[in-house]
Each structure stands twice: as structure tokens, then as C-alpha cells.
Image (tube, rainbow, N blue to C red):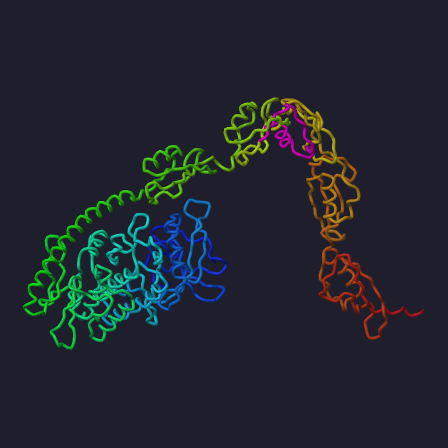
Amino acid sequence: MSDQSNGRHTDEGRDETGAATPRQRVLNDRYELGDPIGRGGMADVWLARDLLLGRDVAVKILRSDLARDPVFQARFRREAKAVAGLNDHGIVAVYDTGDTDVLMPGEVVPLKVPFIVMEFVRGHTLKSRLSGGPLPAQDAVNATLGVLAALNTSHAQGIVHRDIKPANVMITEAGTVKVMDFGIARALADSAATMTQTQAVVGTAQYLSPEQARGESVDERSDLYSTGCLLFELLTGRPPFIGDSPVSVAYQHVGEIPQAASSLNPTVTPQLDAVLALALTKDRTQRFQTADEFSAALRAAQRGEMPAQGQDSALDATQAVPLAVGAAGAPTEQFQGAYQDPQTGYQPAVDETGLQPAILRQSQEDDDDLEEVRSRKTLIWVVSLVLVAIIAVAGVFFFRWLADERERNALVEITSFSGQTSAQAEQKLKELELSPSVELAFSDTVKEGEVIDTDPVAGQKVKKGSQVTIHASKGPANVKIPKDLSGKTVDEVRTTLQGLNLEVAPQTREVEDAKVEKGLVAGTDPKEGSSAESGSAVTILVSKGQVNIPSGLDGKTEEEVRKELTDLGLVVDKKVTTVDNSDIAKGLVVTTNPAPGSKIKVGGKVKLSVSKGETKIPEDLVGKSVDEATKSLNDAGFNSITIERVDDKADKDEVLAVTPKSGETLGIDEPVTLKVSNGPKTVTMPSVLGMTSQEASDLLRNTDNYGLEVQITEVDQDTTKPGQVLAQSVPSGEEVKQGSSVTLTVQKPAEAPEE
């Protein structure tokens, strides 16, 4: 297969027809799919990587819209079987086959679709080459010789291609000719190898042999006729016959002679015209009998020679392609094209039958033979007229047969039945002459009884009488249990649940529910609002009419407890009882009456006991840090604590006093004041050296200045003045706490003289 695309595709491997891509990216655990590289009438082609052998391959996957048709399945598998046995460099090789899963739009179960693993060829088709106009004669002949070489191999193994055309011939980058697409190939031994399958002519109209167009059995000579059509198009840029419809083209193949290729392209030689005349002869017994004969004639034409007369397909005067004999003693034989009069070079006129008469060879006999020649002409004309009449009658029956077949095989488009019931869809399909059947399936989006989709899907065209499966909804696979069942009777709820395709357990189960009167439905199991599998069992829960007063109410606010009890269907007394409780803060619920755990009927009254919140101020708060004291008060239940800070000799954050005092009883919301030390004030030590001890002491002890305690140490130094400060224990400029002790060293005073 080539990297040249003959179809339309997108980056996702989908074209405008919506063809689905395979679900598997690696086929048979071996072939990893890459990009789509082409699309034909029967299959999509993907570039792939053979993970086992490490090479690029082409994977040809039957189009998913044709995968359900057994005719196309057989045709596709036949291609693999036909080519697998052909080992020729001129035929695209088949390596492997298998099946892959393709998920069709709107379907859940993937479809098994066959695929063929083929040789990946880099190049282009002859069809793409023809887009630029006719090929040079040499290139056209060489390409045709390559096709004939491939056909020689397939014919030798009993395989007829049956669809030779430019789109099925590749020219590789190296210039090698490759024949591909044996999709409608048949074995010669198959006695039913005609061109009619499922009552339709198979092949491409512009390249059909006359026997194919008539629906007769085919053989290798049919491929040679198609190859002649191919050569004609390569030389002229158009097929030998063109028309408004495939039927008109097929009719021309059967009953008309093509114009000479040289009349469309003056560069075509008479030798090539002669080869084409033989190749396109209507009677297959008179055209080339083998691919080798055709090839030999082409090579002779390349050398400037006419086709040899001694071939198995030797012409006589009654053939559509006559051979003119030269004068006696002439060294060569001059071939006159089947399309031209040997004397004038023009085509003979078309008579009233619509067909050209056979062209007779020019007689070079003596005048004595003239009467014999005239008699032979008369006989030929009579036979021709009879044949024309037979062909005309056959044509009438042929066209009637085609019309009947067209009506019988007319395609019907399946419409969408969205929103319609399966019965309505069945009726409409029968009106379209289709055969419907119904299958039920769950659907979360389609109502029960309505159509989900069809198989084949809506929009697809099928033959009349084809089987169409209607997928009708059984309702959702998962059903949502309604939320509004509480308070209804058991019978009402049972009817509702059964209507949703749910099974209702025969036994109900009693539960306590404050909101629902005794005997009415309090809920379901699974619970209301949840999803349950369709057909699964649901238990109805019935209210006992009694409620348990819940535990865990103590320590909650009055508002929280009132709401919780009211939600249970109980009535909470507006008046509350206050009680002393050192464990529960003021205003919070201590207990209920009836007590938690008691049973009470729905609508019963409940009283609340609320804490006064008074408790004693803890002992030993003085001397603790402010954080420790605050924690002790919080643990005791006090939540209004005031901190009052003062300067003091005590350490910073040390509690100096508590108001009220420790041991007193106080409401937990009432304020407690802690007097806390900011710590002693610091001062900068001055220099008192040289002062008298009295001056220095007065300065340092003055609380307005420094507030320090002064210690005096006396020493005896003869060099100093008595009482003078010699040293200070704290250097000048250093920060020191008020109240700290400073030692001054002073000169000992002189002793008084003895009297």
C-alpha cells in the first residue's frame, strides 16, 4: 500500500462519511496504527508499525459501514486470500490478516471488522499521474508492461484481478510498477466467476470488458481488455468510452468501437493504435490471449513494428480489427487500425442501428476474385444486420433487467426514531420494506418503551428486505428512589416503587422517626434519593411513633439542643431550669427531662436544665506566670480575664495578685483581674569615680535617679584622698536593674591622731 491517499481523511482517521476508527491502536499485539493514509470504496488504509519485525506496513481495514454486509466481508477476505499466494515484485504483498474492534456511533458493543496487513509502498498511483494530463508514450508503455508482468503472475496461478484501472496501479519512488486491490479478484476455476454479485455488476464502468458488462463469465482476457483501457487513458488522458452514466458506458463497451488514440493524441504511433485495436476487440477470442502476447506486441510497437499476424488471436476479415495485406512480394505487412478505413484513414459512418460496421480488409486479389469478395461482403452485411437485431433485442431486455435490478436493489435510508415507541418504529420500517426486530436494553436517558437507536444506525442506507434491529429502552439501569415517600401509606409507596421497576420486600421494617406518625412510611432502604439497580429489592421503613431522647446534649447551647429535639418531633418547654455546675459553662445545657436515652412519643414535651456557670477561683495563682494563671482560670470555666500590668521588682509576667481572691465563688462569665509585673526598671550606670563615698551613695540610691543599693568597701592607698571612690563594681554605661546592688571601693579615711 502507498503513502498516497485516494480518499479524504482527517487527523483523527475520520472522514466526512463519519467512518469510525479502531478502538485498538495495536492490532494483534503487533501492528501499531499510525496516521490514516488513504480511503477507498471498500476500506480505510492506515500506516502502521510492525513491532515484531520493526518495519512499516500498511493496514487495510474494511470500512465499518460495510462490515455487516457479508458480501463485502467475503470480498475483503477474498482479496487477502488471492494476493497471499502471489509472490511477485509487481504485486503489493499481503503479510497478515486479522480482525479488530470498531465502536459504531451510538453503540456499546464493538463490531468485529477484518483487516489486511500489506506491504507499505512509497509512491503514487497512475490516477494521480493522470491528473497532470496524458503520459509520454514511453512512460505509458512501460507502466502497462509492468501491469502485464503482474497479471502474468496472477493469471499463472489462476487469479483474475477484474478491476484493473489507474487507481489500482502504483509507481514506486524507484519507478517500479505495483498492482494492488485484488478486492474483487476471483479464481479462474470458480465456475460462477461472473461480474454479477448480489445482482449488481462489479467493477469500474470505464474499464469493463464486454463480457463483464454482459454479466458473462470472466477470464484472464477480461483483465487484458481492462489493461487496454488503461493504456488508452495513459496515452490520451481519458478512457476509451465516456458517458452520462455507468450503464451508458457499459453499453458502449458491448456495442461500439472506440476512436483511435492517435485522434486524441497525435503523438501516438500507428503501431500503438494497432496494439490498442487488438486489446480492445469485443470478441475475447480475437484479442490478446495472454499477458505475454500483449507485452510482446507492446515491445514490438516500441521497435516500430506492427503486431505479428501469427498470434493465436490472428485476425480475419470478419473481425472488428482487420489486418491489411500488402502487395505480393512486399517485405513487410502494414497493419491498418481497427478504427480507420485502410484507404481514407477515417472512421466509417455510424448506420441507423447505432453501430459501426465491421471494416473489411482491402482486397489485393485479381479482378477474377472481385465477385467472390462482393459475395463475402453481402454475407457479412447480412450477418451484421442479424447481429445488430439480436443486440438490439438483447439491449432492450438488458435495460429492462437493469431497471428491475435497480428497483430490487434500491437503497433505503434508515430514519431516526428518536422519541418514538418501538411499535411506531416497527411499522415505519415495514413501510420501507425492511425487516425489523426489537431488542430491549437499559437506558438512563430514554423513556421505557421508546427507541434508543437502530442497527444499522439512522442515516445509513441498506437494501430493501434488510434486517434492522430496534433497540428499545427498558428504562434506566439505575433507578433513583424518590425523596418524597415519608409520611405516605405503605400501599402508596409500594405502588410508586413498583412503577419504577423496583422489587418491594414483602416485609416492612419498623424504625423510630419523630417526624412521622406511627404506621406511616418513615423511609426506605436503600434510602430515599439514592440510586438502586433496576429490578433490585427495596425495603419500606415504617414509623414506630416513638423517639429516643439522644445523648450528648450536655455542653451544647440551648439553641442547638432545642433544634435537635424539635427535628425529632418533640416539643421543648420554653422555660428552663438553671443549676450550679462547675464543669459546664454558664448558659449551656446540663441535661434534659426526661433524661437522655428515655423513650417518648412523638410530640412529647422536654424540659432543659442550663448551667449557672459559678465556680471557685483557683488557688496558688500568685507567683505563677501570667500564661499559667490564665490557663488555670480557663480550665476552671472562667472566660473573662483581665490583665493589669505594673512595674515591680518581681520577674516580668509574674502574677502579683488576683481579684477576687483565690477560693472565692464567681460566675464564669464575670471578670477576674490578674495584676502582673512588668519586671524591674533598668538604668544606665553612671561613673562615680573620684566622688566621695557620700556623694556617690546619695546619687545611686536616689530612686528618682537610679534606685540602686550601694555597698562600700574601704581600702588603704596612700596616694588618694580619704573617702574618695576608687572603683565601682558595675562599669559606667552598663544597663542595670533598679534595686540591684552596686559595690563602691573607696579610700579608707585617715585615722585620728592619738591624744
Q: Quadrant of residue 316?
A: bottom left
Residue for point 36% across, 40% down = 416
- Considering depth in this image, is 475 or 332 the residue closer to the camera? 332
- Image: 617 above or below 15: above
- Looking at the rendering, the stretch of residues picked out in magenta corresponds to 538-566
For residue 385, say whether it is visible: yes
Residue for point 62% across, 22% down = 518
- Considering depth in this image, is 262 or 576 the residue closer to the camera? 262
Q: Is residue 544 magenta?
A: yes
Horizontal relation, residue 440 to residue 390: left or right: right
Residue 226 x/y as whole percent: 26, 61
Q: Quadrant of the N terminus?
A: bottom left
Horizontal relation, residue 498 to residue 208: left or right: right
- Image: 449 above or below 647: above
Residue 434 x/y as whole percent: 35, 39
- Total label count? 0
